[in-house]
Amino acid sequence: MAQEDLDLDVDGGEAPAKKSGSLKWIIIGVVGLLVVGGATFAALYFAGIIGGADTPAEVAAADGAKADAGKDKDAAAAVAKAPPVYFPMEPPFVVNFGADADV
């Protein structure tokens, strides 16, 4: 009992078989495609090329064009252009663009 054979493999013996890394590369490829696809969709969406709602001016122009199908095209374009909206500010907002930056 004092002399037990522990069978320790100290020499290294055979190296364990390497697992194939193909699953890792497939996952990396799928994630990469999702990132590139998402970035492309976001760029096209924010550029206004795909998706998204029309601007209010475009909606008004389309409604005006439908209503004035037989009328003058300039009248439909005039409907699409709304006057600018200005809000009064009390007290008046003052900006000094010529001020020194040493403040």
Image (spheres, rainbow, N blue to C red):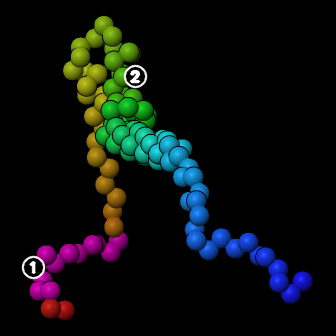
Q: Residue furthest top?
A: 70
Name the residue located 30 percent from the left edge and 30 percent from the top edge. Answer: 80
Indicate whether residue 18 is drawn in magenta. Answer: no
Q: Can you give x and y, in whole percent of width and height, for residue 16 in the image?
A: 59, 57
**Left or right position of 17 against 8:** left
> Which quadrant, please, contains the C terminus?
bottom left
Return the mark for residue 83: none
Name the residue located 28 percent from the left edge and 46 percent from the top edge. Answer: 84
In depth, the one of 15 and 28 nearer the eye is 15
In depth, the one of 37 and 84 nearer the eye is 37
Q: Do labels 1 and 2 touch, CB within 8 Å?
A: no
Whether residue 31 is visible to the viewer of this picture, yes or no, is no
Give the quarter of the image for residue 43.
Answer: top left
Above or below — where is 31 with respect to 53?
Answer: below
> Residue under circle 1?
98
Whether residue 17 is visible to the viewer of this picture, yes or no, is yes
> Residue under circle 2?
63
Q: Which residues are magenta?
A: 90-101
